[in-house]
Image (spheres, helix red, strand yellow):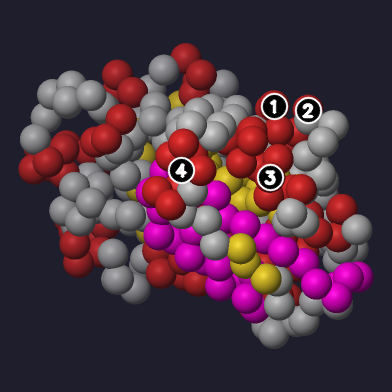
């Protein structure tokens, strides 16, 4: 496994695909350093960040706020409902404005996949862009905090068996994680309703029924059923989903002793996994949330350093 202690600098963070293995490992190590209490030595006295969330969020939005405060960055509040977006202002013009008034970095979550393309192509927008989730596209900061959590547990990705289970079609977490996990040497498997396992996943890993997977894998990564993106077309009840595709207490008991349970959250308790498993000993769901702050500190540092 690559050990990288050199400080990483990035212009933007838009997708994990664009990161080299060295950059990924550098960010993981820096996240771990921040977790142990490391401090940032910024090149400028004052930095401004803004968090532009056009889709709902608790973890990503609030952990970026905590990360910004821990680094001493000034956070410029933005609420879509009180902004000029209500007068018809576009995302492009909103970011253009933030850049013009001196914001150094904008964290953006938006429903459109690749919303960031026109922002990074602009000659006028000067601020760094961190993708906090684009539609059903990518969620690179979640992927990196997931990788940090797995690395913290196992010290490597090579030959780890990782199951990604559930609503893979709509999950930006699944897409970011399958790409990076495979690249870093893990063996990826998928499970959940078979009709959600489409061609794009085949190159990253095989589909197996959950009852076969539970005894095999080191990491059981459960995904939220994204009811809001299903247009009311679900063919199963929540109880049926849990019994067929969810991590029940019985299935969890069959996992390897050292295996861990992950979920990006929010969790539909008793749907993707049993209520009692969310805070169980094998669960790293709370660690994922805590690690989110340290990984986002590492990402903010990398982007602000990259623009200094
Ligand atoms: N995991 C995640 O992205 O959670 P939020 O939607 O609450 O940010």
Q: How far apart are the alpha carbons under marks 1 and 2?
A: 5 Å
In the rendered image of this protein, does residue 46 appear above or below residue 94? Answer: below
**Which is nearer the N-term, disc 3 or disc 2?**
3
Q: For the residue labelled by badge 1, is the local secondary structure a helix, a strand or a loop? A: helix
Q: For the residue labelled by badge 3, is the local secondary structure a helix, a strand or a loop? A: helix
Q: How far apart are the alpha carbons under marks 1 and 3?
A: 15 Å
Q: For the residue labelled by badge 2, is the local secondary structure a helix, a strand or a loop? A: helix
Q: Mark 3 points at which residue?
A: 97
- Crowding at mark 3 (Cα within 10 Å: few <14, some 14-19, many 20+): few
Callouts 3 and 4 close, C-beta under 8 Å: no
Q: Mark 2 points at which residue?
A: 121
Residue 193 point in image, percent of width and height: 26, 27
Q: How far apart are the alpha carbons under marks 3 and 4?
A: 16 Å
* Residue found at the far top of this picture: 199
**Which is nearer the N-term, disc 4 or disc 2?**
4
Residue drawn at the location 48% of the way across and 65% of the way down? 62
Label 2 C-beta lies within 8 Å of the nearest ligand 1 atom: no
Q: Name the residue under label 4.
A: 54
């Amino acid at each position: 496994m690559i050990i990288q202690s050199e400080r990483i600098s990035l212009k933007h963070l838009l997708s994990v695909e664009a990161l080299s293995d060295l950059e990924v490992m550098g960010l993981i190590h820096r996240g771990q350093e921040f977790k142990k209490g490391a401090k940032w030595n910024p090149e400028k006295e004052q930095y401004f960040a803004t968090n532009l969330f056009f889709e709902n969020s608790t973890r990503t939005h609030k952990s970026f706020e905590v990360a910004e405060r821990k680094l001493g960055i000034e956070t410029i509040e933005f609420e879509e409902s009180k902004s000029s977006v209500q007068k018809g202002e576009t995302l492009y013009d909103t970011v253009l404005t933030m850049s013009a008034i001196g914001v150094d970095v904008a964290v953006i979550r938006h429903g459109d996949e690749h919303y960031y393309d026109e922002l990074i192509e602009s000659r006028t927008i000067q601020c760094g862009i961190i993708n906090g989730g684009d539609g059903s596209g990518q969620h690179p900061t979640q992927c990196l905090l997931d990788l940090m959590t797995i690395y913290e547990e196992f010290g490597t990705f090579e030959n780890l068996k990782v199951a990604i289970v559930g609503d893979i079609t709509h999950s930006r977490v699944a897409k970011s994680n399958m790409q990076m996990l495979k690249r870093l040497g893990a063996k990826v498997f998928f499970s959940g309703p078979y009709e959600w396992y489409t061609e794009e996943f085949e190159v990253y890993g095989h589909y197996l029924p959950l009852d076969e997977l539970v005894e095999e894998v080191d990491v059981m990564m459960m995904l939220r059923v994204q009811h809001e993106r299903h247009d009311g077309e679900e063919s199963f009840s929540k109880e049926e989903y849990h019994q067929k595709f969810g991590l029940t207490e019985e299935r969890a008991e069959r996992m390897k002793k050292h295996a861990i349970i992950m979920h990006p959250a929010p969790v539909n308790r008793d749907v993707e996994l049993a209520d009692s498993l969310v805070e169980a000993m094998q669960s790293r769901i709370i660690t994922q949330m805590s690690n989110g702050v340290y990984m986002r500190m590492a990402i903010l540092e990398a982007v602000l350093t990259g623009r200094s």
